[in-house]
Amino acid sequence: MVGNHRAGSIPASANMTGMDYKLVAALTEETRAAVFSFLRSYNRAQNPAFFAARDLPENAPQPLNVVAFDPSGTVVGGLTAETQFAWLKVSIVAVAENARRHGVGRGLMELAEKEAVARGCRHAFLDTMDYQAPGFYQKLGYQIAGKLENWDSHGHAQFLFTKGLGKP
């Protein structure tokens, strides 16, 4: 049971009338687990080889963090990412305002990409807003893979970027 509702499958011949649809402010852990189990089961059935490989400990996502320090040892920038299979997934790149336009961001990205290639990655992925750094990533060889207009509901677009790394 999930709350007072049973989790499970409905026979294909079932009539969908009589379903009880509710807006809920928050999901209980039990309800969340039930909902996620439907997607997890479907995905695993559609791509069993990927999920079997992903479940192996040696294929777990590996954190990749790069920090830039000035000569006095003060942090002036950082990058957080992870690698898994053939992909580098960059989450955050941030550089102190006084260190911008001095190659810090480029240095962070180059070291992350170099380490990702050493880990066997052949591709990189990241996203950025139009007011952040799309031009910066394009200068580093990233290509726009997608653009979501008005992503923040205040007129700003989000860009999705990819880049090939190393040998295919």
Image: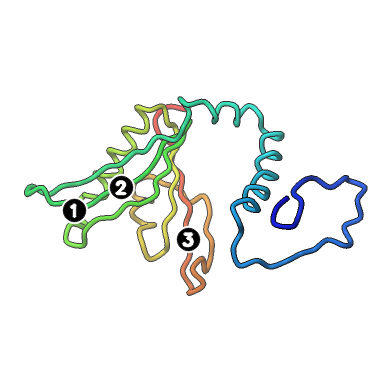
**Tag 1: amino acid:** Val
Label 2 vs label 1: CA separation? 11 Å
Can you tell which of label 2 and label 3 is closer to the viewer? 2
**Tag 2: amino acid:** Leu
Q: Residue 28 is drawn in which quadrant?
A: bottom right
Q: Nearer the viewer, residue 139 or 82?
A: 82
Residue identifier under label 2: 79
Compare marks 3 and 1 and give the one earlier in the sequence: 1
Report whether 84 appears left or right of 37: left
Compare marks 2 and 3 and give the one earlier in the sequence: 2
Residue identifier under label 1: 76
Numbered disc 3: secondary structure: strand
Q: Residues within 10 Å of mark 3 (few under 14, many from 20)?
A: some
Numbered disc 2: secondary structure: strand
Residue identifier under label 3: 158
Q: Position of residue 151 (x, y in %)?
A: 51, 65
Q: Position of residue 131 (x, y in %)?
A: 38, 66
- Residue at 36 percent across and 62 percent down: it is 132
Label 2 vs label 3: CA separation? 19 Å
Q: Is residue 23 above or below residue 105?
A: below
Numbered disc 1: secondary structure: strand
Q: Position of residue 100 (x, y in %)?
A: 21, 58
Label 3 vs label 1: CA separation? 25 Å
- Residue at 26 percent across and 49 percent down: it is 78
Residue 117's label in the rendered image is none
Are the residues tagged 3 and 1 within 8 Å (C-beta)?
no
Q: How many marks?
A: 3
